[in-house]
Amino acid sequence: GYIKVGNNLVINSETGKLDSISSSKSQIYQHIINISPYKFSNNNFGLPENISETDLSKSDFYSINEAIQFIRNLDLYQFKRDLHNQWIIKLSPGIYLEENISIPAFVSIEGSGNENTFIQFKKLSISSNTSIKDLCIKIESDINENQIIYIDTYTIDKELDYYNKSNTIDLGCNNLVKFCNLVICDDLFENKNLIHIENGNLVIMDTNIDLICFNIEERNIINLAIGNKLEIINGNIKI
């Protein structure tokens, strides 16, 4: 099995070797995709040349968008993606620089803590049954965009084809998006809306939003379209 010694030593269950670098296995068949922002090599750590790359902790992908595209391209008959077969993208500590991120239905993103896992992007689009937790979001404002985080859970990914597969889903009950244990910050917030909820129910838990604005133009932290729900639990908003 997996044995941890102290705070940073692990024993590889296959080789019995004690090391300060964990040797992880792919968990794709368990619907878990591991992401690292770094491609490891011996030179990264100054390790001896006789330690091969297979001894190092390797990830399935090295960017969030690579993982999302992989999930979108999967055969949905072999790898189901629905209410009972959801996917998790797990992020190792580090900073992830992405231009735009579009998270499909039934896919969630988990960091390794909001003090050591950072995502920086210009725009984030979210579909239904998605959670984002345990990370820090560093907004890269674009004055030409109306919103940074756009939530629309009404249109389920057409590739899932629920109705033709007799696998219908009640959008009124299952269009939930959750933000848990996040820090959302921007040192120069220039957009009209931070979060726009076009369709869906958003729950924000244990999340701090910290924005700096340098003008007095109107700013909406959360813009809620009529008919949608918002619940904030233990959240702090500082502007």
Image (cartoon, helix red, strand yellow):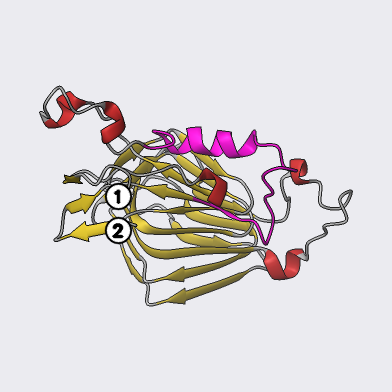
Q: Is residue 63 magenta?
A: yes
Q: Which residue is mark 2?
A: 113
Q: Main secondary structure of the magenta part?
A: loop
- The secondary element bearing badge 1 is classed as strand
The residue lying toward the viewer, choosing from 20 and 158, is: 20
| Residue segment shown in magenta | 59-88
Quadrant the N terminus occupies: bottom left
The residue lying toward the viewer, choosing from 37 and 79, is: 79
Q: Is residue 71 magenta?
A: yes
Q: Is residue 189 left or right of residue 129?
A: left
Residue at 28% over, 53% down: 212
Q: Is residue 153 left or right of residue 57?
A: right
Residue at 44% over, 33% down: 99
The residue lying toward the viewer, choosing from 160 and 177, is: 160
Q: Position of residue 116 (x, y in %)?
A: 24, 52
- The secondary element bearing badge 2 is classed as loop
Q: Which residue is mark 1?
A: 117
Residue type pointed to by label 1? Thr
Q: Is residue 18 left or right of residue 13?
A: left
Residues marked 1 and 2 touching at CB (< 8 Å): yes
